Image (cartoon, rainbow, N blue to C red):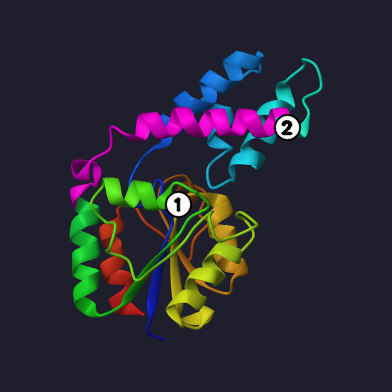
Amino acid sequence: MQFEAILFDLDGVICYTDEYHYQAWKAVADEIGAPFDRTINNRLRGVSRMESLAIILEGYIGPELSEEERLRLAERKNSLYRVLLQQMQPSDLPENVRETLQRLRGTGIRMAIGSSSKNTPFILESIGLGDFFDAVADGNCITRSKPDPEVFLKAAEMLGVPAENCLVVEDAVSGAEAGHRAGMKVACLGDAAAHGAGDWNMKDIQELLEIVTEV
């Protein structure tokens, strides 16, 4: 079977904003006295903002927070994160990613983003990929975050490509699960690859070029 489309997660695959997420959530956690470290931060990969906050609040022992207060904290985190994102520029797109995307474009294969982040358009614009992808499914058009398959099914629908003809590229175990639940093959990087979560577990995104030609 030849893949008709590749659906990329954004953070950890196309670019790296983990440190910005960590700094923003750390500031919010410190404000309310909730414990937060990089181990907890790793659990937030591929997870929506409100679900991330729920994970952070597992260790919170202060007064009960209302839904309104939780929403305020989530928005506070996003405001801090967006300030940090202002530092991003086209040079933050890794060269191996840029080269891989350009070579994949030359094969005629369609490409889309499948990310839970509502900041996806802003990030893509910042790194010079605002108009690159054929479709963008993100937190602005879904109601359920990974491991629910909604974002990848939405991306495939936007491309008009059957799910079984799509390859997902992910770095989070929850994202790999979402891809499989969508009925798609999955190529993993980073943490997900270390856990053997993909049909292919890569050390470098450039290995995608071999995967799409060997299938």
C-alpha gap between disc 1 and disc 2: 38 Å
Could you say which disc has been placed on residue 193 in the image? 1
Q: In this view, does 87 lie to the left or right of 191?
A: left
Residue 15, percent from left and from top:
33, 46
Kind of residue indicated by mark 2: Glu
- Against 23, residue 155 (above or below) is below
Residue 39 visible in the snapshot: yes
Give the magenta range: 69-95
Residue 125, percent from left and from top:
29, 51
Residue at position x 38%, y 29% in the image: 83
Residue at the spot of label 2: 68
Kind of residue indicated by mark 1: Ala
210 vs 125, nearest the viewer: 125
195 vs 190, nearest the viewer: 190
Residue at position x 53%, y 42% in the image: 45
8 vs 141, nearest the viewer: 141
Camera-side mark, 1 or 2: 2
The magenta stretch spans residue 160: no
Pointers 1 and 2 in contact (CB under 8 A)?
no
Label 2: element kind: helix
Q: Earlier in the sequence, mark 1 or mark 2?
A: 2
Label 1: element kind: helix
Q: Which residue lies furthest to the bottom in this view?
A: 1
